[in-house]
Amino acid sequence: MDDATIIERLSALGHELPPPPRAVAAYVPVKIAGSIAHVAGQIALADGVPMHAGIIGADVTSEQGREAAALAALQALSALRGALGGFGRLRGISQVTVYIAATSDFVDHPQVANGASELLAAALGEPGQHARAAVGMSSLPLGACVEVQVTAEVDPA
């Protein structure tokens, strides 16, 4: 994939690729194993603070969760780009898991997760289409309402 094309698509969507994330605990942001890149779970951060912190269905709306999912996916793209030295080796996204901190009666997980899925498809085109799981949780790291984990296909180094 071409760096300039993806950056241009993101810009057209009103997004700027943030700097690649740093690990906040004992892990690496991206682990490449052959032709598979595993991106550690990403949360939407603004100035180091989780965006829309809290529980969806209680103190965070579904729309805010959807926005957080999109920004977490953007953070995952930044992590991939940083680990790969650009988008040139990226072949596509194969799997996305969206963890959603929600009340026990919340049932709109797919709509929240669409924030991540739609951003990836819009930024990457067909290679951004992927399998997905949307999973409800009682809480997430740093109080985030959404965490996005990505598995991508890459050209081996």
Image: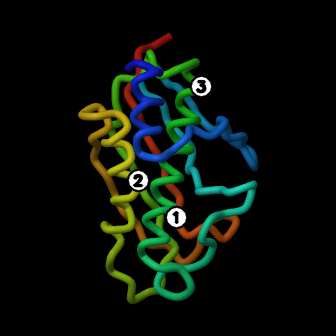
Q: Place residue 13 in its image quadrant.
A: top left
Residue 135 horizontal/vertical position (percent): 40, 66
Q: What whole-number distance in Å separates the C-alpha atoms at marks 2 and 3?
A: 20 Å
Residue 88 horizontal/vertical position (percent): 44, 16
Task: Answer with left or right where residue 63 lies relative to residue 129.
Answer: right
Q: Residue at 72% across / 40% down in the picture?
A: 22
Q: Which of the pair 98/53 is nearer the observer?
A: 53
Q: Amino acid at mark 2?
A: Ala
Q: What whole-number distance in Å separates the C-alpha atoms at marks 1 and 3?
A: 23 Å
Task: Answer with left or right where residue 143 lies relative to residue 115.
Answer: right
Mark with earlier residue (2, 1):
2
Determine crowd level at label 1: few under 14, some 14-19, many 20+ residues with C-alpha closer than 10 A. Answer: many
Whether residue 138 is situated above or below residue 66 in the rendered picture: below
Q: Residue at 43% across / 27% down in the picture?
A: 36
Mark with earlier residue (2, 3):
3
| Number of residue marks | 3
Quadrant (top left/top right/bottom left/bottom right) for the N terminus: top left
Can you tell which mark lies on residue 83? 3
Query: Which residue is identified by label 2?
Result: 116
Secondary structure beneath dot 1 equals: strand
Determine crowd level at label 2: few under 14, some 14-19, many 20+ residues with C-alpha closer than 10 A. Answer: many
Can you tell which mark lies on residue 146? 1
| Marks 2,1: beta carbons within 8 A | yes
Secondary structure beneath dot 2 equals: helix
Q: What whole-number distance in Å separates the C-alpha atoms at marks 2 and 1?
A: 10 Å
Q: Amino acid at mark 1?
A: Val
